[in-house]
Image (cartoon, helix red, strand yellow):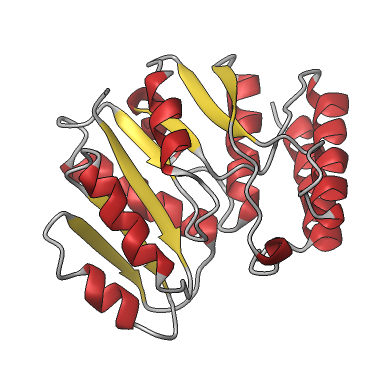
């Protein structure tokens, strides 16, 4: 397995995160960065701090998923970039299987952003998730002439050379991950898609992605990104 560092941005997680982190450690990840993005309850993070392989970084207030990822990126650049080849970002809601984490890392490429893409044609996909992704995927292709099957996937492998370039990109929420895709297209940095298990827990009720509002905001980012050279 390539030397890749897991990074988990987290806001008000449930206790399944503790067991998930333990499983990551069991399969060979000896350091795991977790961002407490201004969570109200601290008990889960206090428990994770007991594990010497967990690096807990804390935002005093909720700044957004993008801001949390960038905090983790900057820590990596300052402290761990000589030891690890890159980072895999993982959502905190237990919807990325350990199997898929390992599989994506096996496709590591120093010159490619690896996306773990969901199959939105499966029957278990909530309608709002299916519609939101279909809309943003089609809009991305319209503006940037490239099909991205899952524009909002949180399971991504970022190689070191890309992290150095994107850790100061605009966006503190879902928009950051969108801006990363736009950056890669403009810089002709390769994007590779790998199919992952499509897991939705409780019909994806815990998702913080607001289908209509966030999809419209993402399209505004597409337009803004297109105007920039």
Residue at 21% across / 58% down in the picture? 54
User: Quarter-wise, where is residue 222 in the image?
Assistant: top right
Give the image location of residue 217, x and y in percent: 79, 54
Left/right placement of residue 173 relative to residue 213 reads: left
Which image quarter is the C terminus in?
top right
Residue at 43% across / 18% down in the picture? 107
Give the image location of residue 43, x and y in percent: 31, 83
Please state which of residues 137 and 179 is positioned toward the viewer in this rendering. 137
Can you say whether 99 is above or below 49 in the image?
above
Which image quarter is the N terminus in?
top left
User: Quarter-wise, where is residue 128 in the image?
Assistant: bottom right
Residue at 57% across / 19% down in the picture? 192
Give the image location of residue 9, x and y in percent: 44, 58
Please state which of residues 8 and 142 is positioned toward the viewer in this rendering. 8
Q: Residue furthest left?
A: 52
Left/right placement of residue 122 relative to residue 47 reads: right
Give the image location of residue 156, x and y in percent: 50, 36
Residue at 56% across / 33% down in the picture? 116
Can you say whether 76 is above or below 92 in the image?
above
Report how many numbered discs are placed on residues in the image.
0
């Amino acid at each position: 397995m390539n030397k890749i560092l897991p990074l988990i941005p987290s806001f008000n997680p449930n206790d399944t995160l503790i067991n998930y982190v333990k499983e990551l450690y069991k399969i060979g990840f000896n350091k795991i960065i977790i961002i407490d993005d201004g969570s109200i309850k601290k008990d889960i993070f206090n428990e994770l701090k007991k594990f010497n392989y967990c690096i807990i970084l804390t935002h005093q207030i909720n700044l957004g998923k993008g801001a949390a990822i960038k905090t983790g990126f900057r820590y990596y650049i300052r402290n761990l970039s000589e030891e690890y080849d890159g980072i895999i970002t993982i959502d905190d809601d237990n919807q990325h299987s350990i199997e898929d984490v390992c599989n994506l890392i096996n496709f590591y490429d120093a010159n490619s952003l690896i996306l773990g893409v969901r199959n939105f044609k499966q029957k278990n996909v909530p309608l709002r998730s299916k519609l939101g992704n279909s809309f943003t995927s089609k809009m991305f292709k319209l503006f940037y002439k490239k099909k991205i099957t899952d524009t909002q996937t949180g399971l991504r492998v970022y190689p070191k050379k890309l992290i150095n370039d994107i850790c100061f990109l605009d966006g503190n929420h879902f928009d950051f991950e969108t801006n990363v895709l736009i950056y890669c297209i403009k810089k002709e940095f390769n994007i590779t898609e790998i199919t992952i298990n499509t897991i939705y827990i409780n019909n994806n009720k815990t998702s913080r992605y607001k289908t209509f509002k966030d999809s419209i905001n993402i399209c505004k980012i597409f337009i803004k990104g297109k105007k920039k050279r």
